[in-house]
Image (cartoon, rainbow, N blue to C red):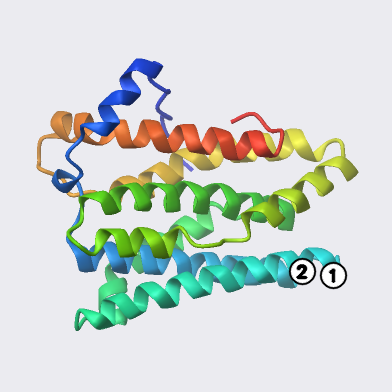
């Protein structure tokens, strides 16, 4: 995997710029947005389902299977929005399938704990990003954000990973390193959803406040596990 430069957080005063960014300038068209988000949720469901099969502990299986159910429910809700707009879900999702499948291969961990952290980190980042990006959509934005913001089972996953870390003193440092490796590739997926004007500098300036907020949320996700982002 090629090294990816990970952006650094801007000073707190620059966060105010996120409130002024015109999200409509960077948001994609509605159907591509829905298709991209729907396939991301489908990928999360598939990855979580594989973790259920790999985990040996029944309590872990139950926790992860519930999270898989939440991801599938979000996917189905987004698919319903595509159909409501006379879109063919398979065709709308198809342009994103190869990249997301490849992303899943890149972010596969060495064991089910790394895989679970991978879903927790990447899905948390991408859902936060797509919720913010929904602010640039038309009247469908609030509905898309509502669907993505529904329950995900995140709290139960945090508790499960905390228990695993407490049971294995070496696991925490390994997961912290894994979480840092995942961030760069996850940002590439998020950037691929943006509408680009052709001017790399202006595109970067418009999207930077959104990424600043999402990276801050990612740091909080890692903090919840007692890991360094």
Residue extending farthest to the right is 167
Q: Is residue 56 visible?
A: no
Q: Where residue 61 is drawn, which disc sits there?
A: 2
Circle 2 SS class: helix
Asked if the residue under mark 1 is in contact with the one under mark 2, i.e. CB atoms within 8 Å, the reply is yes
Height in image: 113 above or below 98? above
Kindly report the distance in space between the C-alpha atoms of the residues bearing marks 2 and 1.
5 Å
Q: Position of residue 187 (x, y in %)?
A: 40, 42
Residue shown at the point (45%, 38%) measured from the top left:
184
Residue shown at the point (32%, 65%) measured from the top left:
143
Q: Position of residue 63 (x, y in %)?
A: 73, 65
59 sits left or right of 16 in the view: right
Q: Which residue is disc 1 drawn over?
A: 58
Height in image: 120 above or below 99? above
Height in image: 224 above or below 114? above
Residue shown at the point (17%, 39%) measured from the top left:
22
Residue 46 is drawn in which quadrant?
A: bottom right
Q: Position of residue 66 (x, y in %)?
A: 66, 70
Q: Where residue 28 is drawn, which disc sits there?
A: none
Q: Position of residue 13 (x, y in %)?
A: 34, 16
Q: Few, some or many C-alpha atoms within 10 Å of disc 1 (few <14, some 14-19, many ≥20)? A: few
Residue 88 is drawn in which quadrant?
A: bottom left
70 sits left or right of 209 in the view: right
Circle 1 SS class: helix
Residue extending farthest to the left is 198
225 sits left or right of 24 in the view: right
Where's the C terminus, which quadrant?
Answer: top right
For the residue pair 120 and 109, the one nearer the viewer reads as 120
For the residue pair 72 and 44, the one nearer the viewer reads as 72
């Amino acid at each position: 995997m090629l090294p990816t430069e990970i952006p650094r957080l801007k000073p707190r005063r620059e966060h105010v710029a996120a409130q002024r960014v015109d999200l409509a300038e960077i948001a994609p068209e509605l159907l591509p947005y829905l298709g991209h988000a729907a396939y991301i949720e489908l990928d999360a469901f598939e990855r979580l389902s594989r973790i259920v099969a790999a985990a040996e502990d029944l309590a872990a299986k139950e926790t992860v299977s519930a999270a898989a159910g939440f991801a599938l429910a979000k996917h189905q809700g987004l698919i319903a929005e595509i159909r409501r707009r006379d879109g063919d879900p398979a065709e709308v999702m198809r342009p994103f399938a190869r990249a997301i499948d490849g992303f899943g291969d890149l972010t596969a961990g060495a064991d089910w704990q790394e895989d679970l952290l991978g879903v927790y980190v990447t899905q948390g980042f991408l859902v936060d990003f797509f919720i913010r990006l929904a602010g640039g959509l038309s009247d469908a934005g609030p509905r898309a954000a509502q669907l993505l913001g529904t329950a995900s089972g995140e709290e139960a996953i945090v508790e499960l990973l905390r228990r695993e870390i407490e049971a294995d003193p070496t696991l925490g440092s390994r997961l912290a390193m894994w979480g840092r490796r995942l961030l760069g590739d996850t940002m590439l997926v998020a950037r691929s959803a943006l509408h680009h004007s052709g001017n790399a500098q202006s595109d970067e300036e418009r999207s930077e406040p959104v990424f600043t907020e999402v990276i801050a949320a990612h740091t909080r996700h890692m903090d919840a596990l007692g890991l360094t982002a």
